[in-house]
């Protein structure tokens, strides 16, 4: 996959991205908003194994967000199985120096369109923690709808948190251009 979002790019991972990702992912503010499976501290070896898994997957559903010179974040789809095979969870993070420029809103719009038009999925969902207004704002700007609150659904950093459930639903034939 290759998509331009302004002066940034969504593209396939390359193993050469590992040093920049290890640098940017090693950030507690990022870890706080993701699952505990996201390492902290985040080492070069963590970056290499993450990128290897992303490259070897079939189909490839996890992509780098990058400048012309380095990877600055990640966005991907976790595909559902069985009766959920037309749905996917979208997940993402961005390097802190690049926050607040509208990059992730564009990336979420772009990957959602790709999921519906190219992968033929029907529903994309996200479950931001209630402590993450920036991600909620991204999803709302990308036309995701809040379907509810998953009460006490997360135990993160020693605290029980609520989670929001957001989704974007569409069929390929009726999909508006976003
Ligand atoms: C969430 C994240 C991806 C946002 O990326 P981004 O490129 O900065 O997002 P955008 O610039 O497209 O939009 C962010 C919006 O959130 C708003 N925002 C940021 N912090 C906020 C806060 N504390 N309260 C309310 N709104 C906030 C911004 O003002 C902006 O909205 P606006 O355009 O209406 O002004 C990034 O902060 C990140 O990687 N966070 C850590 C990982 C994470 O949370 N991943 C998502 C897990 S569900």
Image: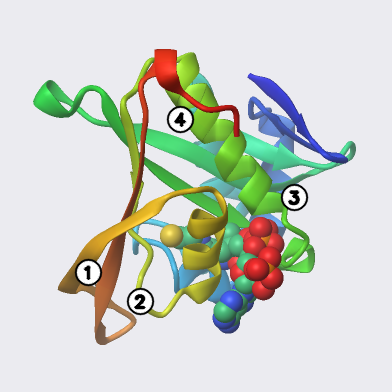
Q: Residue at x 42, y 35 (%)?
A: 77
Helix, strand or loop at label 1? It is: strand
Q: Quick check: 153 above or below 21? A: below
Label 3 vs label 1, nearer the camera: 1
Q: Give whichever of discs 2 and 4 has the lower sequence position.
A: 4
Circle 3 residue: 20
Q: Residue at x 26, y 86 (%)?
A: 159
Whether tag 4 and tag 3 are in contact, CB under 8 A, the answer is: no
Circle 2 residue: 130
Which label was assigned to residue 68?
Answer: none
Query: Where's residue 4, x and y in %?
Result: 78, 30
Name the quadrant of the N terminus: top right
Q: Nearer the viewer, residue 57 or 97?
A: 97
Q: Quadrant of ligand 1?
A: bottom right
Label 2 vs label 3, nearer the camera: 2
Q: Quadrant of residue 5?
A: top right
Q: Residue at x 72, y 51 (%)?
A: 103
Query: Where's residue 166, x and y in %?
Result: 34, 54
Bin the neighbour count of mark 1 within 10 Å (Cα to Cα): few under 14, some 14-19, many 20 and up: some
């Amino acid at each position: 996959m290759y998509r331009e979002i302004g002066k940034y790019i969504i593209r396939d991972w390359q193993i050469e991205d590992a040093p920049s990702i290890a640098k940017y992912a090693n950030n507690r503010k990022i870890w706080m908003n993701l699952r505990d499976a996201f390492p902290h501290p985040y080492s070069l070896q963590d970056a290499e194994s993450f990128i290897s898994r992303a490259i070897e997957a079939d189909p490839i559903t996890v992509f780098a967000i990058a400048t012309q010179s380095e990877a600055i974040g990640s966005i991907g789809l976790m595909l559902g199985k069985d009766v959920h095979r037309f749905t996917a969870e979208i997940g993402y993070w961005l390097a802190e120096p690049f926050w607040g420029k509208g990059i992730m809103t564009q990336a979420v719009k772009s990957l959602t369109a790709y999921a519906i038009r190219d992968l033929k999925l029907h529903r994309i969902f996200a479950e931001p923690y209630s402590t993450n207004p920036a991600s909620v704002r991204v999803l709302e700007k990308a036309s995701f709808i809040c379907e509810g609150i998953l009460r006490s659904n997360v135990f993160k950093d020693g605290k029980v948190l609520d989670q929001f459930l957001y989704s974007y639903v569409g069929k390929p034939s009726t999909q508006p251009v976003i």
